[in-house]
Image (cartoon, rainbow, N blue to C red):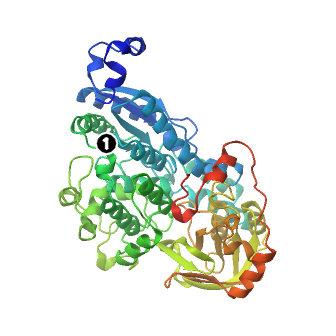
Amino acid sequence: MRSDITKKGLERVPHRALLHATGLSRKDLKRPFIGIASAFTDLIPGHIGLRDMERFVERGICYGGGVPFVFGIPGVCDGIAMGHLGMCYPLASRELIADSIETVCNAHQLDGIVCVTNCDKITPGMIMGALRLNIPALILTAGPMMSGHIGKRKLAFVHDSYEALARAKKGDISDKELACLEMEACPGAGSCQGLYTANTMACLTETFGLSMPGCGTALAGSAKKRRIAEATGERIVEMVSKGIRPRDIVTLKSLENAIVVDMALGGSSNTVLHLTAIAHEAGIKLDLKRFDRISRSVCHIANIEPAGTHYMEDVEFSGGIPAVLKRLKTHLHNVKTASGRMVYDIADEARILDEDVIRPFDRAYHTEGGIAVLFGNLAPDGAVVKQSAVNKPMMKFTGTARIFNREEEAMKAIMNNKIKAGDVIVIRYEGPAGGPGMREMLAPTAAIVGLGLADSVALITDGRFSGGTKGPCIGHVSPEASAKGPIAILKDGDIINIDIPNRKLSCNLSKQEITRRFKAWKPVAPKITTGYLARYSRMVRSADKGAIVQ
């Protein structure tokens, strides 16, 4: 066992003394040491239930013959960090999380690891750390939150909080109604109810095989989730004994399966960043063009919040990810998962319990997948849009640039009615390095929808969007402004062309004019010059490379 280096031999007497101090017996020293990397915190709704998950994982590890050790992993809530300096940290925290996994597991030479997680950047960060280590690993996501309710009306976090701000500004809802929505939109533990980033990553983790079948959609706090947690603990001990490692599971074929499911469900655009970074840790080349090729070949078969009317609980009650795999079987590679089962076996045993939630191909919501990748003179290295959340009239749009160098500037203009039909809001210097941290733009995008401008105003940015974003919002523009991307030299009044069907993002500027403007361009001074974010800004790579740190 890997942990034997800390347990065996005369020279390890001091090490054994310290291990015995934790309560371990001599018998325990003969068993595999399994880490439980837990992102429990009272600060994140999606993570307040992780103590319970830890207990059941521990039980499973003990049943399997291992010794469990719980250790902490940092986590932040994108929603609470949104709209202020705090939003510079979530994406950057992904690298801290991967580094934390590497540090603890290597320092203590653990034999295997279960990562207990749920929310946006925490899950991919843990996967990246597990792949870097390449010791037996499983991911346990804690599950989606149930929908909120006012009477018989279902509520969702984004629509009934962020978009409600703008509706209140217009006078469409009263202060009393707003306060009620605020109290009831998020009824308890779990990741937010729609197919936002957290739930998308949970579904994709199950798809490419690092979570147990059923894990991705099993609801937070449910008995089913407890049983999956226990099975996860038991299985990780088996994986240690058989030498099954994450890079045996996460391959190009399994990642392509994840992209297929992502496109079919209409998942968060953030998954492009995360899957690319995960592939990098696995030593796999995964570029933006592969995402788009798969998107063009897969129908969009689920209509989940924020783009649609269904919730994650509806996906769960329709058969979960196994049912999705069943529907998509002809598009998938038959690869092995960490559970020991092949993808086709999982698909064959599944049942599709609601064919409106998981539609057949002949009733698909869209003939293409949920995400499109655009290129052009504004995005030579690519840009990303969640096309399943864009209304048909805005799939092709030409408008006039309104330039902002910070999210706050744009938000102020939107809320003060300074944005008009036909405008293209450009928010720049919000990329991985320039932000730093590539802030999410949920507040301005939700405000646009709430003010009734979703079919007449577009937004482009070198930042990114929440999985809750809907409308013609194009992010990840690469190169970013601070890396001398063409978005840096745009001016108010420039004409911007968006053509999602033909995958184009361009401005009406000649090559000569772009060159002339760059000669006069001066980079904006770094926003943050000390601490972790300053280091991150110096080391992070472009969004099209997954915003990895090297």
Nearest the viewer among 252 and 11 is: 11
From the viewer's side, name the closer residue of 170 and 91: 91
**Residue 165 image offset from top left, x and y in percent:** 68, 60
Q: How many marks?
A: 1
Which residue is at the far front?
11
Task: Report the residue marked by disc 1.
Answer: 224
Above or below, 510 against 60 in this view is below
Q: Is residue 262 shown above or below 95?
A: below
Using the rendered image of the protein, determine whether residue 461 is visible from the camera's viewpoint. Answer: yes
Tell me which residue sits at (63%, 78%) in the image.
Answer: 378
Q: Is residue 18 left or right of residue 182?
A: left
Circle 1 packing at 10 Å, graded few (<14), some (14-19), many (20+), is some
Quadrant (top left, top right, bottom left, bottom right) of the N terminus: top left
Q: Residue at x 56, y 49 (%)?
A: 184
Query: Which residue type carries mark 1?
Result: Lys
Residue 194 appears in view: no
Tell me if 419 is positioned left or right of 104 in this view.
right
Judging depth in this view, the residue of 479 and 436 nearest the camera is 479
396 on left or right of 27:
right
Q: Quadrant of residue 24?
A: top left
Q: Is residue 12 above or below residue 73?
A: above
Q: Quadrant of residue 415?
A: bottom right
Residue 200 in the image, given as x and y percentages of width and height:
44, 57
Residue at image x 78%, y 62%? Answer: 524
Give percent across and percent down for residue 291: 42, 70
The residue nearer to you, when weighing 254 against 1, is 1
Mark 1 lies on a secondary structure that is helix
Residue 459 image point, x, y percent: 65, 73
